Image (cartoon, helix red, strand yellow):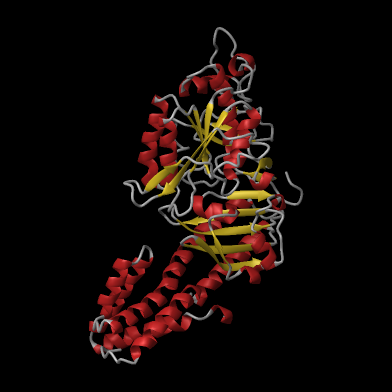
Amino acid sequence: MHNVAVPAARPLARQLAEIADSLGPVMAPVDQRRQLDDLCATVRIATGAASVSIARLDGDELWYEAADGRGGAEVIGLRLPTSRGIAGYVARTGQSLVVDRVEADPRFARDVAERVGYVPESLLVVPVTDAGDDVLGVISVLDRTTGAGDPLAVTSAAARVAAPVLAVAGAISRLGPLLVRAVADAVEADEPQLATALRRLAAETDEPAAEVAEFAAVLAEVRLLPPAAQRTIGRMLRDAITLATPRRRW
Amino acid sequence: MTAGHDSILPAWSEPFHAADGPGDAKYLRLPGAVDRNWAYGDGTGRGVRVAIVDSGVDADHPLVGGVAEYVAIERDDRTDTGLRLDHGPHADLYGHGTACAAIVRELAPEVELVSVRVLGENLKGSAGAFAEGVEWCINHGIDIINLSMSTASDRWAEPFWELVDMANYHHVLLVAAMNNEPRRTIPSEFAGVFSVACAPGTDRERVWSNPRGPAEWGAAGIDVDVAWLGGATIRTTGNSFAAPVVTGHLARIRATHPGITNWQAKTVLGQLAANAPST
């Protein structure tokens, strides 16, 4: 990838950037998704629940990344605003919430219930937070029964395990679109240095995407290394790309 | 407890559920007894301004019985703080604030409820907004603040420390729920607030004192029925729903003894605690 700005590449790069904007969020390493699925299964067994899901907070939306149990397959891929609903409250406040007799709440996530074909009777939602208490996502436990331990304590412990996984998943999901956008911008501006384009993106983008752009700029600087080092790093990147695969293959 | 699953015990509530509970409340042997009649008067909380710093309050919910005043903290990038205050009527976004308001109304039916909504659209992180909400209350004649939320973030410890002291010296009673999980819980872990976790049972007339803290007070919050959105009632568990029980009791006390301070009110509430030694 060297710095030849082919005129025909411009519209193509722009299209790629637009596609990446919509594709990016559904990209994540397979291993992470499996880790989150396994965590859901563990919580489900420990709480005797019908279903457990993990959603990642992205801006003002919760993106359901992993699930286990009843309605689990249907819930994955859902994006719900945090401006309402019990999971939304937990994501916005970082406070866990336990609600039984959920059906008594007429506004309780009707859309979710209709899409997954399953209306829970009880719901326990715990925030996943980072060391600074910023919310990374939520774990939802639907219809717990008599499990192996206090369900709130079990789910809270799982949330601590999920935290680093969700943090990395968030960064990865932003990396793809940023890279492609930076390439597009660099081509358009006849900018020979991808790192420069990425740093410009970092300056224009809100946190946490800006951090990812900055990191990507560092990666772009790898080009300045000797060819052997570049080849090694290139192989590592291809391995990473292999791991990133559309959701439907999982 | 609901059939089909075990009850949940929120963090910090454990002392109230130990075999011998939190032990005896610290009891001051005064020359005369502090009884409920002297402490609570007619028990209506008449005229006491109680702020629910939360998700908003649904004034039309039959268990809420109206809201006297509204304040919503909204995001506004044009201001120094990035926030602005809206005073028009607002809705409850989630149901949580309505639940807290209805519990206070149940215990002290003639309080003036003030909804201070701190979870508006586009607010990034709630801690700054609820600090702003608490500060507004201290400066605007609120008698009792119910804060059924907390932050675990160290960076908010000092601002809330200042707010708690400010509330004390303005004789504003600040009731704060402990987090449901065993982590930092700011400002509820501070000694200057009425920190609340869940005690056994669902009887909201009983308040427990835990002299060893940091959850200094216990009240019903496990498998309790609370008001929610759309006029509904749901069953829930959380320290959030125990805090407004203490707020309701304090509203009765404050109405009967206007201007009563934090430390005076703690003494009165402690004398009436469910675990006060029998005299």
Q: Position of residue A158 (x, y in %)?
A: 55, 59
Q: Is residue B167 left or right of residue B238?
A: left
Q: Quadrant of residue B57?
A: top right
The count of marks equals 0
Which residue is found at the position 62% from the left and 31% from the top? B105
Q: Quadrant of residue B122?
A: bottom left
**Can the viewer see residue B22 in this picture?**
no
**Can the viewer see residue A76 in this picture?**
yes
Q: Quadrant of residue A184?
A: bottom left
Q: Position of residue B183 (x, y in %)?
A: 48, 46
The quarter of the image holding the C terminus of chain A is bottom right
Identify which residue, A187 or A232, lies in the foreground.
Answer: A187
Identify which residue, B42 or B113, lies in the foreground.
Answer: B113
Q: Is residue B215 left or right of residue B167?
A: right
Which residue is found at the position 34% from the left and 90% from the top? A9
Task: Examine the rendered structure and indicate whether residue B65 appears above or below residue B260.
Answer: below
The quarter of the image holding the N terminus of chain A is bottom left
Q: Residue furthest front?
A: B88
Q: Position of residue A216 (x, y in %)?
A: 33, 74
Q: Position of residue A21 (x, y in %)?
A: 44, 75
Task: Examine the rendered structure and indicate whether residue A210 appears above or below residue A223.
Answer: above
Q: Residue furthest right?
A: B3
